[in-house]
Amino acid sequence: MKKTFSKESDIFLKNKIDNNNVITNSLMELVLVEPSKKNNIKNNEINILKEIIYLLEQKNYNSSYEKISIINDYENYFSNTINQLKIAMEFIKLIERVS
């Protein structure tokens, strides 16, 4: 799930960067873009991505899902992660029922 989220975050962040420059477009295809773990960032969406990474590492799927839904146009960028989160949350509910 973390790999899927990482790939979708990369696409999301690349789309947020001004892509009108030919050089920038060419370079963006070669690099992976992700939120910084060391620097303070003022962009709220990037901070939310950082929080989601932490929540996924903690296997806190409900909160991850809630945070993703805060992001503008999240359905278009994070559909695979959302589907995986729904499966994980449903699986946990089933395990809790059986226990």
Image (cartoon, rainbow, N blue to C red):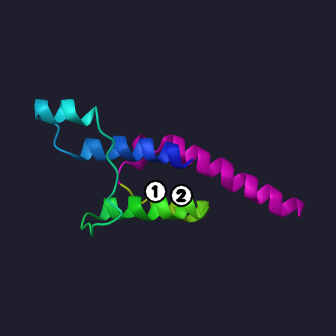
Residue 75 appears in view: no
Which image quarter: residue 44?
bottom left
- x and y percent of residue 13 in the render? 30, 47
Residue 62 appears in view: yes
The residue furthest front is: 38
Q: Which residue is mark 2?
A: 65
- Residue 70 sits inside the magenta stretch: no
Residue at 53% x, 64% y: name it. 55
Q: Tell me the element at label 2.
A: helix
Q: Are marks 2 and 1 in contact (CB under 8 Å)?
A: yes
Callout 2: few (<14), some (14-19), or many (20+) C-alpha neighbours within 10 Å? Answer: many
- x and y percent of residue 59 in the render? 62, 61
Q: Which residues are magenta?
A: 72-99
Callout 1: few (<14), some (14-19), or many (20+) C-alpha neighbours within 10 Å? Answer: many
Circle 1: residue type: Ile
Q: CA distance from mark 2 to mark 1?
A: 5 Å
Circle 2: residue type: Tyr
Which image quarter: residue 20?
top left
